[in-house]
Image (cartoon, helix red, strand yellow):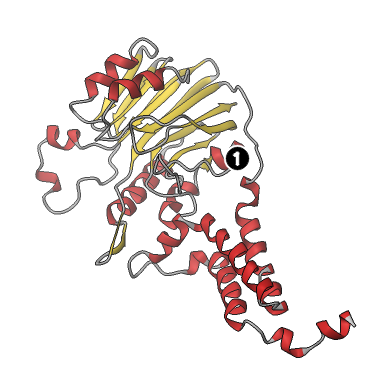
Amino acid sequence: MVLRSAARPELWKRAPVLTVSALLLGLVMMLHAQIPNRFGSVGSLVETFLPWFGLFVPVLAAGALWRRSAAAVTALVLPVTVWLSLFGGLLGDKSGAGGDLTMASHNVGAENPDPAGTARDLAASGVDVLALEEITAQDREVYEKGLAREYPYHTVQGTVGLWSKLPLSGTRPVDIATDYGPLADTKPADVTMAGNRALRTTVATEKGPLVVYVAHLGSVRLNPRAGFWTDSRDRNAWALGEALAADRSERIALLGDLNGTVDDRALAGITSQLHSVQEAAGNGFGFTWPAKFPVARIDQILVRGVEPTGSWTLPATGSDHLPVAAGVSW
């Protein structure tokens, strides 16, 4: 009787909208890299929030069961399989303790109402190397004073800085095409430096040097006229990728607010050379923005030549981003 009922053709004809929706969901996730960015950077927008597409699965499943549609239930195998292949590795806790070096990165926020409190919280984290982004001219002294006791070595290059318990050397700004256009070369050096958004330095550790980049890529905007506007971010990402490609150092770490997830094709020039500590040794997705209800991990620690031992987010500060931290060994 059960087999006869299951074989009835009408069971496979019900809920065609649900069936097609399930197949489309799977195809969007599977072929996300093929979604064009030509109009409104739709591809990058999809890739920014790609993990959240999995929330459509239980919704469609509930609809399929309510409509008793075997076709819709079967179609859901595709999005479930694709989502697990993309993000199943992030469901477990791979984070461990310790490591030869601990690092943290935080976009402290230009409108942070409590930079002194943020500095105290970050100093209490105990990490060996601390990168800050979006440092304003008026708050720079606050961070330098608040972090001086824990971090005797530091550098600030424009709006980004690095504080370290270990000596630094070879520090310099990195040109990531922040100033762009025919008038870029006419700006005075002090004006250009004030808006600098990337640096490179070398941390002296007991196991040898570690080259550290700190970067804050251009912001992205979502609006009706331009769609997902990513021009400055994409230009900065390309320039940073070129700088990394030219760097032959054995061990490199990139810390910063990249205004993009590691799934975003715009960061491919970076992510093809460095790998995410969160994916290698994190617990879950490690979303960082916005701090009150994180939906995307746009604050990254990426490495090459070292082994991630752990990755985690730190408690919220006065910023609209969460700090990220990681341990590495080599």
**Horizontal and vertical percent for residue 68?**
70, 77
Give me the residue at 37% from left, 33% from top: 214
- In the rendered image, the quadrant that contains the N terminus is bottom right
Give me the residue at 64% from left, 29% from top: 96
Residue situated in front as seen by the camera: 168 or 117: 117
- Does residue 312 appear to the left or right of 187 in the view shown? right
Q: Residue furthest top?
A: 149
Give me the residue at 72% from left, 89% from top: 10
Note whether 37 is above or below 251 in the view shown: below
Local SS, label 1:
helix
Residue 8: name its quadrant.
bottom right
Residue situated in front as seen by the camera: 79 or 85: 79
Note whether 80 is above or below 134 in the view shown: below
Note whether 22 is above or below 305 in the view shown: below
Q: Residue furthest bottom?
A: 9
**Horizontal and vertical percent for residue 296?**
45, 48
- Does residue 204 appear to the left or right of 136 in the view shown? right
**Horizontal and vertical percent for residue 277?**
54, 37
- Does residue 141 appear to the left or right of 230 in the view shown? left
Task: Tell me the amino acid under the disc marked 1.
Answer: Ala
**Horizontal and vertical percent for residue 257?**
37, 40
Is residue 119 in view from this perspective?
yes
> Which residue corresponds to mark 1?
280
Q: Residue furthest right?
A: 1
Residue situated in front as seen by the camera: 294 or 140: 294
Residue 230: name its quadrant.
bottom left
Residue situated in front as seen by the camera: 294 or 180: 294
- In the rendered image, the quadrant that contains the C terminus is top right
Is residue 249 in view from this perspective?
no
Give me the residue at 29% from left, 47% from top: 218
